[in-house]
Image (spheres, rainbow, N blue to C red):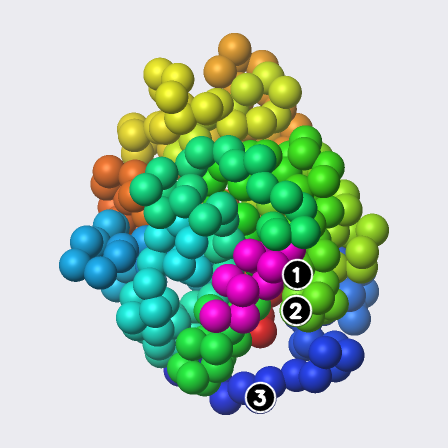
Amino acid sequence: MSDEQREHRAPSAQEPRDREPRDREGRDAGGSGAPAVRTVDLNSDLGEGFGAWSLGDDDALLSVVTSANVACGFHAGDPTVMRRVCAAAARRGVTVGAQVGYRDLPGFGRRFIDVDPAELVNDVLYQIAALDGFARLAGTRVGYVKPHGALYNAIVHHEAQAAAVVEAVHGHDPALPVLGLPGSAWLRRAAEAGLPCYQEAFADRAYTPEGTLVPRREPGAVLHDPEAILARSLRLVTEGVIEAVDGTDLPVRADSLCVHGDTPGAVEIARRLRAALTRTGHGPRPFTTP
C-alpha cells in the first residue's frame, strides 16, 4: 500500500466496498489461478491512552504495521486520542480498524461483563460510529472491526454476545469486514450474516491445545523473546501451524498477525517481524482496505 494518503468518500449502506481481488488461498482471482506467494497483514492495538495517561508508542508502531486496531473509548482511548491516531494512520496509509470492547475503562476491557445482548449491540454500534467519524475527518474510514480483550475471548464461545456484535457491525455497514479467532462463534455468525471474515493469529500470545489464547493471568501467556516470536510467526505463515503450550502443533490459517501495542518491546518485535516477512516475500500487506 502507498504511504500517500488516499482520497475516500463515504459509501451508502448498500454500496459495496472495494476489495482486493484475492481468494483465501492467496490466488489472483482475476488471473490464471496459480498460487501466489502468501502474504499476511501485520496489526497492532493502538490508541489505548486516555487523557494524560499514555500506553504504547502509537507513532512508532504506525510506521511498521499495515492495520491499526484503534480503541474506541470504552476499554481505552478518548476522542482526542482517537482523532490523533486516525489522522496518523491515514497519513501513513495504514488501515483503521475499530477495536470495540466492553464498557470497562478501569479493567482495560479485560474483564468479562454479562451485558444484555441488546445493550451490547448499541455499545458496539456507538463505538464503531464514533471512530468512523474521526476516520472520515482524516480522509479514510473504518476498514474492519476487531473486538478487544475479554469481549474477543467471550465471543469465541458466547453465542448471544457473538450475535450481538455481528448485529452491530451489520447494522453499521453490511459490507464491513471483521477480524477474529479461527473457529470462533463470532466469525461463524459473521459469515452467516454475510460479513467478510478474516482470521487472526497472535505473534506474542501463547495458545492452548484447543486453539484459544492462554488467559493472561497464567504464566507464559504473553511471549517476550523476539527470536521465538519470529520463528513461530514465520512457521505459521509458511506451514500453517502454531505450537500450543503442550507442544502440539495447531493448524491455523491467518490473514493477519497481531503484535500487542502494550507488550514490552512491541515496537522492536514488530519491526523485526515486518523485516522477516518482507525478506521472505510474505508481506506485510493489509488484509482489507477501506
Q: Residue tagged by mark 3?
A: 9
Q: Residue at x 52, y 28 (%)?
A: 213
Q: Answer whether labels 2 and 1 touch (C-beta < 8 Å).
A: yes
Q: Left or right: where does residue 146 sit relative to residue 218?
A: right
- Image-quadrant location for residue 138: bottom left
Which amino acid does the dot numbered 1 rest on?
Val
- Element type at marker 1? helix
Decide which of tag 1 and tag 3 comes sooner along the chain.
Answer: 3
Residue name at image x 73 percent, y 37 percent: 159
Residue 128 or residue 197, whichever sits in front:
128
Which residue does the numbered mark 1 point to in the structure image?
169
- Foreground mark, 1 or 3? 1
At label 2, counting other C-alpha atoms closer than 10 Å, the crowd grade (few under 14, some 14-19, many 20 or more) is: some
Along the line of sight, the residue nearer the viewer: 277 or 120: 120
177 left or right, relative to 4 = right
Q: Main secondary structure of the magenta part?
A: helix
